Image (cartoon, helix red, strand yellow):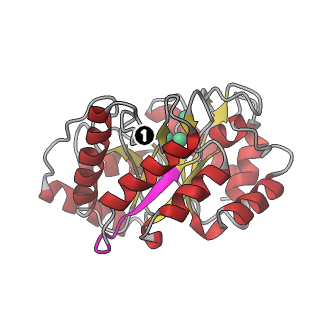
Amino acid sequence: MLKIGCHLSAAKGYEHMGKDALKINATTFAFFTRNPRGGKAKAIDEEDVKKLLELLRENQFGKLVAHAPYTLNPCSKDEKTRDFAYMAMSEDMQRMEYTPGHYYNFHPGSHVGQGVEKGIEMIADLLNRVLTPQQSTIVLLETMAGKGSEVGGKFEELAEIIDRVELKDKIGVCMDTCHVSDGGYDIIHDLDGVLDEFDRVIGLEKLHAMHINDSMNPMGAHKDRHAKIGEGHLGVETIKNVITHPKLKDLPFILETPNELDGYAAEIALLRKEAGE
Ligand code: FE
Ligand code: FE
Ligand code: ZN
């Protein structure tokens, strides 16, 4: 069975996310570890987390894919922003241990004119300061659209970051279908070719999760505007090819389409049907 779900609000707690997931027939989900645009994290309610863990077990959920705040930028020019990245990610690593063994995804960062090499160095440096051998969480670099000075729009850039990270078993990649297409990878006509390239440059064993989004823009646009499934340039067929691909089908698939819960429920139902469930 597909492990598929969407971004869920953490505002009402952990167990509440699990119940929302069940309502829409999801078997994984994503959530922000803290306010996506701000910084402060709510204190963790251990009882609430325990209830979620039980719910996940009872309903055969796949791995969850938590998302770091958008404001986390390890390669900012501004020291305060870099300090926040360190503070937020280290604290998030501790928070993630309440839900052991899941994934934590982040946007590698924007180098804001300092150059991609400098950006890569700073991102790897943050990871080397934050990651510990004891942690059970695998941190995922997200493939980016290459908008502005974003690092991670090319597989080579992600490979270079991973190359510099000391604790290799704590680092992986989350591929976003909107972002890779915007980044210039032709998953519409040549998904196999893109996956071969990923394997050659990064290694498919590093690919742990997928963000499943349609794109409002054509391949190579570097825009990063998500569309609902079937309402963008990728189309249902491309998304179907992704979720049923023999090399991908067992990964957690997270929808980040512009939807409320009922819209997500409909997309999950559609994709389960497309996958032959
Ligand atoms: Fe993201
Ligand atoms: Fe994404
Ligand atoms: Zn995006």
- Quadrant location, the N terminus: bottom right
Label 1: which residue? 75
Give the structural element (helix, strand or loop) at label 1: loop
Drawn side of residue 150 relative to residue 261, left or right: right
Indicate the quadrant containing the C terminus: top left, top right, bottom left or bottom right. Answer: bottom right
In the rendered image, residue 31 lying in the magenta stretch gets the answer no
Residue drawn 61% across the image and 38% down it: 213
Is any part of residue 63 visible from this angle? yes
Name the residue: 28% across, 58% down.
93
Apparent side of residue 68 relative to residue 46 in the rendered image (left or right):
right
Q: Position of residue 103 (x, y in %)?
A: 41, 59
How many residues crowd mark 1 within 10 Å: few (<14), some (14–19), many (20+)?
A: many
Residue 135 colored magenta? yes
Q: Nearer the viewer, residue 225 or 50?
A: 225
Q: Is mark 1 within 8 Å of ligand 1?
A: no
Under mark 1, the amino acid is Cys
Q: How many marks?
A: 1
Q: Residue at position x 57%, y 66% from top? A: 206
Q: Quadrant of residue 250?
A: bottom right
Up the image or down, 129 lies above or below 153; here it is below
Along the horizontal axis of the image, is 1 left or right of 13? right
Counting from the top left corner in percent of width and height, residue 73 is at 39, 38
Residue in the image at 25% along x and 35% along y: 39
Looking at the image, residue 120 sits to the left or right of residue 184; the answer is left
Residue 207, position in %: x, y?
Answer: 59, 62
Q: Look at the image and give the residue range highlighted in magenta.
A: 133-141
In the figure, residue 115 lies in which quadrant? top right
Residue 157 spot, x, y in % from top left: 61, 50
